Amino acid sequence: MYEPYITDFTMNIHNKILNNYLDKIKDISDYVYAVNNIDEYPLNKRGNILFNLGGVLNHQLFFSILGQGEMSEQFKNKIIEDFGSVSNFKEEFIKNANYVVGSGYTFLVLNKDNKLEIINTSNEDTPYSYGLKPIMNLDLWEHAYFLDYQNNKTDYINNFFSIVDFNKVSKIYEEIQKNI
Ligand SMILES: [Fe+2]
């Protein structure tokens, strides 16, 4: 679907991993609520539940923003307001992605001050745990690039913006703004 940047084989691996996460949180229906109210679960299970919740939320977001599409005016204006320009935003996103070591993600998030920010997270941490609203992300686990790019993670990162559907990203941003 996103060849040659991400092969179907790799997308299939992501899907298998997602299904495994989903299987472990079958009893939970509202994932974001569960992340925000993790103290409702027994202390010794929280770490595991959070890991699987994050795994689902992070993969679902990643799958949802892949494709082709243009930014809305509203979203583009916000990007320019917070990053100076669209190209600055892309540059900063790529720079941050290159800082990720081990397993993790780079995210565009909306913070509590209603500003866009680029952050890196480890493993399956979700920005919701830090009071941040995720808008788009790049999966930087080894399974996300190793089969297609081997050790050339930088090429995978540099190709990312060729397969981002910014129309979908804009909709996610606009939906968050509507609900603030
Ligand atoms: Fe993945």
Image (cartoon, rainbow, N blue to C red):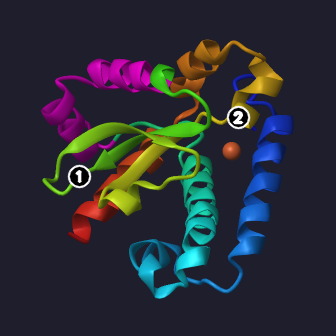
Report the residue at 63% width, 20% height from top: 156
Determine whether the beta carbon of the residue marked 2 sits less than 8 angstroms from the nearest atom of ligand 1.
yes
The outermost residue toward the front is 44
Image quadrant occupied by the N terminus = top right
Q: Is residue 112 left or right of residue 14?
A: left
Image quadrant occupied by the C terminus = bottom left
Provide the residue designation for mark 1: 111
161 in magenta: no
Q: Position of residue 137 (x, y in %)?
A: 49, 42
Is residue 2 in sight in this rendering? no
Q: Position of residue 76 (x, y in %)?
A: 26, 37
Question: The disc labelled 2 sits on which kind of residue?
Answer: Ala
Is residue 170 in sight in this rendering? yes
Relative to residue 153, is residue 17 depicted above or below? below
- Label 1 Cα crowd, 10 Å radius (few <14 / some 14-19 / many 20+): some
Q: Helix, strand, or loop for circle 2?
A: helix
Q: Position of residue 179 (x, y in %)?
A: 25, 72
Disc on res. 144: 2
Q: How many marks?
A: 2
Prevailing secondary structure class for the magenta stretch in the rendered image = helix
- Label 2 Cα crowd, 10 Å radius (few <14 / some 14-19 / many 20+): many
Relative to residue 38, is residue 168 depicted above or below? above
Report the residue at 22% width, 23% height from top: 85
- Image: magenta residue range: 72-97
> In 3D space, how far apart are the residues under numbered discs 1 and 2 (Cα atoms)?
26 Å
Asked if the residue under mark 2 is in contact with the one under mark 1, i.e. CB atoms within 8 Å, the reply is: no
Report the residue at 30% width, 63% height from top: 176
Question: The disc labelled 1 sits on which kind of residue?
Answer: Asn
Q: Position of residue 62 (x, y in %)?
A: 57, 47
Q: Helix, strand, or loop for circle 1?
A: loop
Relative to residue 112, is residue 108 depicted above or below? above
